Image (spheres, rainbow, N blue to C red):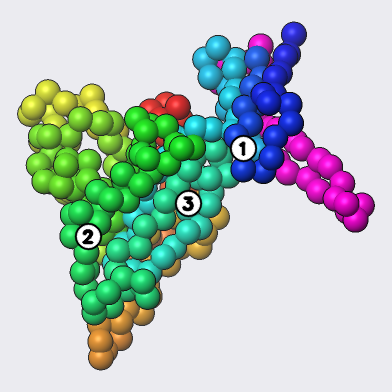
Amino acid sequence: MLSHSVRPARALIDEQISIQGRFLPARSPVTVHAHMHSEEGDPWEAFGHYNTDENGVVNCPGPFPALVDLWGMGGGLHEYRSALFASKGVASLSLAYFAHKDIPGPPNKVNVGDDYFRTAYKLLQDHPDVCEDRIGLIGLSYGVYLVLRMATHMGVKLEALECPLMYIVAEDDYSCASVETANEIEETLRAVGKAALFTRLSYPDAGHLIEPPYAPNTRVSLWTVKPNKINVIWGGHPAPHAAAQEDAWKKMLDFIEDNLR
């Protein structure tokens, strides 16, 4: 029989409340629905989506697993992917590292060093609602290079990798050598007895920019290299690229669930 507990039963807004459900199906989705009326009589509702653990227990709110989310050389701050992770119970820090108003220096180059990325990771580790030993990294395009640097303690010596790595390969990538890079990573890890850490997802006819599902494929776009604008070919064909995004997203979420929960 399902049981739940709320401790404390009453609390102010700045006090943590522990809500726990037990005797639920193991590793299953659960939605917590709260509703009330404001003093003016308006209905207020909130929904939280969680997953039970192997014992059929769900503990909300937090602490949560977390991600540092790094975009590519387009720069700026892009939070749409982090927002999707957060909606699934994974705290996510979308981290700008150049071409952003709050970062000093020329906007067309990376002006931050390794300490900047270490500080971002430490910020999540120290957050009271984050599991300090359940933090992952995700990158797109140039963000993948930065993720590998962070995962190898800012050295990019792949032999130093100690955590599971999922690498998504777009076989029609016109922007970088995705297949060759994946091969090199896999061979390097195999040579040092760490092949089990590596998971490869490979998609023929998918382009460089594999985004969350149902986003349109951008095969070609304008890229500013001041003072000029150039056409950059990212690759990909609409139908297989869309299928790749849908499949990769599901498997990425499963990977996060398996390794961070």
Please tell me which residue lies in front, 10 or 66.
Answer: 10
Q: Which residues are the magenta region?
A: 23-47
Give the left or right position of residue 131, taking residue 13 as reference.
Answer: left
Magenta stretch containing residue 5, yes or no?
Answer: no
Residue 226 place in picture, x, y as percent: 25, 87
Amino acid at dot 3: Ser
Secondary structure category for the residue under label 2 = loop
Measured in 3D between alpha carbons, the distance from the residue under mark 3 to the one under mark 1, in whole angstroms, is 25 Å
Question: Mark 2 or 3 closer to N-term?
Answer: 3
Residue type indicated by callout 1? Glu
Q: Which mark is residue 15?
A: 1
Q: Quadrant of residue 207?
A: bottom left
Q: Distance between the Cα atoms at labels 2 and 3?
A: 24 Å
78 relative position to 222: left or right: right
Residue identifier under label 2: 176
State the residue position of label 3.
82
- Among the 4 quarters of the image, the one containing residue 112: bottom left
